Amino acid sequence: YFGNNGNKKSLHVLTDSRKPYAETVLVCYLCNLPVLLEGPSAVGKTSLISSIAQKVLGTGSQLERVNNTETTTVQDYIGTFLPTGSQIQFHKGALTRAMETGKWFLADEFNLAEPSVLNMLSPLLEGKRSIRVPGSGKILTAHPNFRFFATQNDCSYANRHELSKSLRNRFVEIQVENFTQQELVMILQNRDDAICDTAKI
């Protein structure tokens, strides 16, 4: 999964320190276990999941994502009814799309999520393959290929909540460290080369 794709350069660089993280994510994918990546900002947590999703599931948009804020609601995950012309139509949220189509789902900034969101997600994190949509009673069942991932900074960052021990225990947790100086140089060089190659096409 982590070898080079011919001569094609990727904007995501799998450095030596990231290979163990990638291997753990892949094992969790095979075992259908939810993964929580915690670490400082700008250490590649989100791009690691996105890159592996593309390698495992193929090209195209294989990752649905919610970037949690203090105002994120259950509707951002599930969906909501919105006016479309003269009609009211249901617009599916990222979690609904992922569960129905078998994509991977990523909850970024997970410890900014409100308790109502965490309660809604609880069955999925306990290993169940369905959730009850709050307020409707509808059961949303996951496609066999659906997987759940989350990323967050630790709770020392502004406005982050400390996840309960019972909630954290439902994840395979990966503590992501900062890049080394050498790795940062490698990443910048690779991205410069990839951008130049793209510009030549």
Image: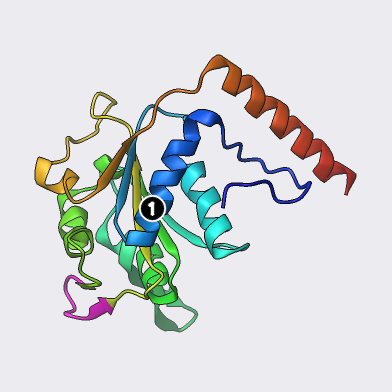
Identify the residue at horizontal 29%, vertical 47% (top origin).
71
In the displayed image of the protein, which residue is found farthest to the right?
Answer: 200
Count of number-bearing discs? 1
User: What colour scheme was applied to this rendering of the protein?
Assistant: rainbow
Q: Nearer the viewer, residue 79 or 124?
A: 124
Q: Position of residue 149 (x, y in %)?
A: 35, 52
Q: Is residue 39 above or below residue 169?
A: above
Q: What range of the chain is rendered magenta?
A: 133-140
Q: Position of residue 139 (x, y in %)?
A: 22, 79
Q: Is residue 124 above or below residue 106?
A: below
Q: In the image, 13: left or right of 73?
A: right
SS state under label 1: helix
Q: Position of residue 87 (x, y in %)?
A: 43, 84
Q: Identify which amino acid the numbered label 1 is placed on.
A: Val
Q: In the image, 115: left or right of 101?
A: left
Q: Residue 135: within the magenta? A: yes
In the displayed image of the protein, which residue is found farthest to the bottom?
Answer: 87
Q: Residue 19: within the magenta? A: no
Q: Residues within 10 Å of mark 1 (few under 14, many from 20)?
A: few
Q: Is residue 105 above or below residue 183?
A: below
Q: In the image, 96: left or right of 113?
A: right
In the displayed image of the protein, which residue is found farthest to the top?
Answer: 181
Whether residue 93 can be seen here: yes
Identify the residue at horizontal 23%, vertical 63% (top origin).
124
Identify the residue at horizontal 32%, vertical 62% (top origin).
32
Identify the residue at horizontal 47%, vertical 77% (top origin).
84
Q: Position of residue 119 (x, y in %)?
A: 15, 58
Whether residue 70 can be seen here: no
Q: Is residue 134 above or below residue 17?
A: below
Our reading of the magenta stretch's main secondary structure is loop
Q: Nearer the viewer, residue 22 or 157?
A: 22
**Which residue bears the numbered disc 1?**
27
